[in-house]
Image (spheres, grey):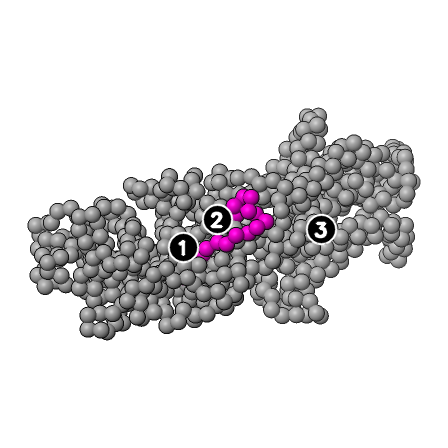
Amino acid sequence: MTGESRMAVLKDAMVGQWRSMGGMAGMFVGTILLAIYIQPFWDRPESRAFGEAGTTKVGLIGLEFVLILIFTGVIIWLAKKGLQIIIKWAVLIILWISLSYCLIPLSSYALDTPQPLVEFRDEAMLENGTFLFTDVEPSTFLVDNHTHLIKMGNASGIDSGQSSNEIWSWPLIINNNSYSYHSKNIVDNIDSYIYCDLTRWVKLSKSNGNIISSYNESCTAGFSTSENDWAIKDNYLYKIDPFHSNGSAVIHSWWYNLPEQFQGVEFMRGVLLNDDKFLLISSNWAGIIEIPKNQHSGEFNEVNATILWQIAPSSGDSFTASAWGHSPWDQNVWWSENSTDRLLMIGTELGGLHGYLWDGEELTIEGHIKFNEREAFNSAIQGIMLGDDQSDGHIDLWIASGGETRMFSGSTMVESLMIEGPVDDGPIDMVLYTVEAPRWEELGIEDGILTSYSHNTTQSAVAATPVNNPAYILQDSAGYWIPIYWSQIIAMIVATTLMVVLTIRPEWYVVNTTGILTGAGVITIIGVSFVPTLILIFMVITAIYDWYAVYKSKHMLDLADTMIGLKLPILLVAPQDNEYSFLDEGADTMSWMDEEKVAQSDVRQKDDSPEDKARPTPPPPRPKKGGNALFMGLGDVIFPGMLVVSALTFLPGGGTILGLSDPMFVALGTLLGGLLGYTVLMSYVAMGRPQAGLPLLNGGSILGYLLSGFIAVGTAAISFGITIF
């Protein structure tokens, strides 16, 4: 056959199948556009399959591919064993879950009122004030305005501009009617505060600010037990002699060396744990000191303090923020007398975040804290707070880092809120209190008011309760509320209904509806889970595998036959005419098409030789009721769609091309590349033989991504800091 005649045959074949090919193209594009539509709903760290850190780990792509191989092998093995019933119900359960990824956002878009964006607003700066300390219950805090130490509460309100409430103030005047301009440090001394400013040691009542005791001590920090008062100066811990204050008569037997990593000028936090233990944190060391009960017999600078527990930052790193408060995993509400667990959080310059649980006796690693494994932060931790944002009795973890403030909630520390700001290079202090929310009064849940103090700004934000009323409210293992909304219930009812209809009457339009919704959900969840570079690698591997599975081993045809025979929406069906019914398809549709094509090839190659005349004539085409249809596996849509959504999720924005943002331009360029691959694919399919779709569809999508990506963002299109694990 000449080239011209081949083109004529191809043209006639494609024109004759324009309806099914056009319908399949529409489903290809529609599924990916639907995924783009629901992408904002799932574009958050807790929705990513392997967390934020997993988005760049190529080993996880290998895991996904191995799971695909296992799934395929198990399905084919079950089919050969005649266990189609197991295949059908297992796939239906998987489809039901996958459908939810699409139906829940669609239902939410249709039924729920959008939650207002939480934003910081500017508040009045602390007038000549410096933020010093936040209490365990972070609605109260201490401020130094250079003339007074002031305890304040309720920093901001629902409306911007509300001033903090002054609870009490204590004058900072020194005996000579002047004020100390040295750095001032506060220690949490259980029911009192210890104030030190390198000129004096003062014990103040937490409730009213009255002086309980004081000494003229040149100390950095201090604490007070039921028996003695103690001070920290430079690298030493010593017991204060009330009769010889300020070292006028140094009693060496009560002076102890602190670890060399600790420096008094780098003091960050001090907490009296009980009469026996004191927690001390500086920028290069943190530890628990055993409080001495008896004086030692050594000389000055010879005896070290007993350290019961200690940590230090890794080389090249330092501690930058800390918090001490109620534990989010305490089984009791934080205001209960039975709530005794405390949590120590320490953040570092390189974005590390460490948690330690105090059970009243010892400090141990808090296993729920897994931020470092997820590489959740890539810039310095500037502020940490443990606070209850809804007055529901359960603590949330607040982190300020890299120009963002993020709140993590629940037993697994899911990111439940992200606020842009504050933008500042230095430390950020946070306070929180709640006000009544009438719509949630029955549950006692309130609106949280967050106020952040940095060197250059004072800002507040209202972390409001949900605007939508839940149908039901559950609790997780840590006691956190889990609202179940009507939109979610309706989405699951629709998913269940589709599964029932699919079981009763799996006609092509039911299969397609389910397939499109399932495909869009899977595309989105995987697309927001991996950066484009990993998706590109995944697509190349699966394209090679698809070519082998269709043309060499042909087990992909067996898999397709199994799914067609069970009438499962793991593929899309595009009818060629109105008489077509998917119910008429047998369990060997794809294999028969392949054999029929080979048989036709044999007929064309026959000549009049005796050997060929003796060759048996191929069987006639299998009779079939109704019309014909075009089939395409759902994976042929999912893989190009994954790259589209990944580009939309992870590419840097900032610019526009043809009125589109850079990520959207690349996403649509990828989609157009996939359509180009689809057109080439259809030129082969038109001749009637099953084709491996991924080599052409993935190839076109990859080409479209690279071209549009380099145009829009240059090498940033492939630069994502990929690691193996």
- Quadrant housing residue 261: bottom left
Where disc 3 sits, the SS reads: helix
Which circle's residue, 2 or 1, is located before the other in the chain? 1
Q: CA distance from mark 2 to mark 3?
A: 30 Å
Residue 499: image location, x then y, percent: 73, 36
Q: Is residue 319 left or right of residue 113?
A: left
Residue 507 x/y as whole percent: 82, 37
The residue that label 2 is drawn on is 391
Q: Decide if residue 440 is on the left or right side of residue 273.
A: right
In-front residue for pair 567/189:
189
**Image mark for residue 138:** 1
Near-viewer residue (49 or 8):
49
Dot 3 crowding, Cα within 10 Å, few <14, some 14–19, many 20+: few
User: Dot 2 surroundings within 10 Å: few (below 14), some, or many (20 or more)?
Assistant: many
516 within the magenta span = no
Is 252 displayed left or right of 193 in the figure? left
Residue 626 spot, x, y in % from top left: 90, 37
Instruction: Tell me which amino acid carries mark 2.
Output: Ser
Task: Check the image and name the residue furthest to the top.
Answer: 82
Give the tally of numbered discs.
3
Of the residues shown, which amino acid type is indicated by label 3? Answer: Ala
Residue shown at the point (29%, 62%) measured from the top left? 185
Q: Earlier in the sequence, mark 3 or mark 1?
A: 3
Which residue is located at x 48 percent, y 68 percent? 123
First reached walking from the N terminus: tag 2 or tag 3: 3
Between residue 469 and residue 621, name the one nearer to us: 469
Question: Which of these two is toward me, 471 or 341?
Answer: 471
Q: Secondary structure at mark 1?
A: loop
